[in-house]
Amino acid sequence: PETVADFWQMVAVSGARPSSRWSLEDETCPMFWPEVEGSVQEYQKVSVELAGSQDLKSLIVRTLKVAETGTTPRVLKQFHLDTWTQSSTVPFSCDLVLKALQHVDHWQSRTDSKTVIVQCRDGCRASGLFCASAIVCEQLKLEQELDVFRTVRTIRASRPQFIVDSKSQKK
């Protein structure tokens, strides 16, 4: 419970607007946002309201209102790629990853915050793939070229656990 409250406190003070979650729900990683539209959950000094939810076939987009006690709520979007199983090292479709990145990018361009919070079940595997994919897509936009291996090597230099050494993730 303290970890969940700490997470929402970080969200509240970071100014982040988009959040990406890349995993299925399971018993070891409980849902930590309200399940019913319009309902509010309190996490110590932070309230979280589920203002809406949209299922876009394998990508769920939740609109959350997050506020510290006594402050105006901030709208946050959670992009949840819910088809990535615990046993697979990659999602079953590269198109889904690109679709999720496009949705995050579109929402981020509409807000004043450039901070994205990325979360996954184990805190590294899916988050690492999201970060590497986002960096490579941004490289392609800005430089019209990309270097996947350099990107992975750079990420691994500071966070070796972020990218699993798996041939299936490099496809």
Image (cartoon, rainbow, N blue to C red):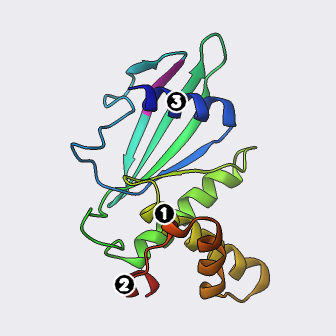
Overall secondary structure of the magenta stretch? Answer: strand
- Residue flagged by tag 1: what amino acid is it? Ala
* Mark toward the start of the polypeptide (3 vs 1): 3
Q: Does label 2 or label 3 sit earlier along the sequence?
A: 3
Q: Quadrant of the C terminus?
A: bottom left
Looking at numbered disc 2 in the image, what kind of residue is underneath it?
A: Ser
Distance (Cα) linking label 2 and label 3 = 34 Å
Q: Which stretch is magenta? A: 46-51
- Whether tag 2 and tag 3 are in contact, CB under 8 A, the answer is no
Q: Position of residue 109 (x, y in %)?
A: 70, 54
Q: Is residue 50 visible?
A: no
Query: Helix or strand or loop: what does disc 1 sit on?
Result: helix
Marks 1 and 2 sit apart, C-alpha to C-alpha, by 19 Å
Query: Mark 2 packing: few (<14 Cα in 10 Å), some, or many (20+)?
Result: few
Measured Cα–Cα span from mark 3 to mark 1: 26 Å
Residue 100's mark? Answer: 1
> Contact (CB < 8 A) between labels 1 and 2?
no
Read off the residue under disc 3: 6
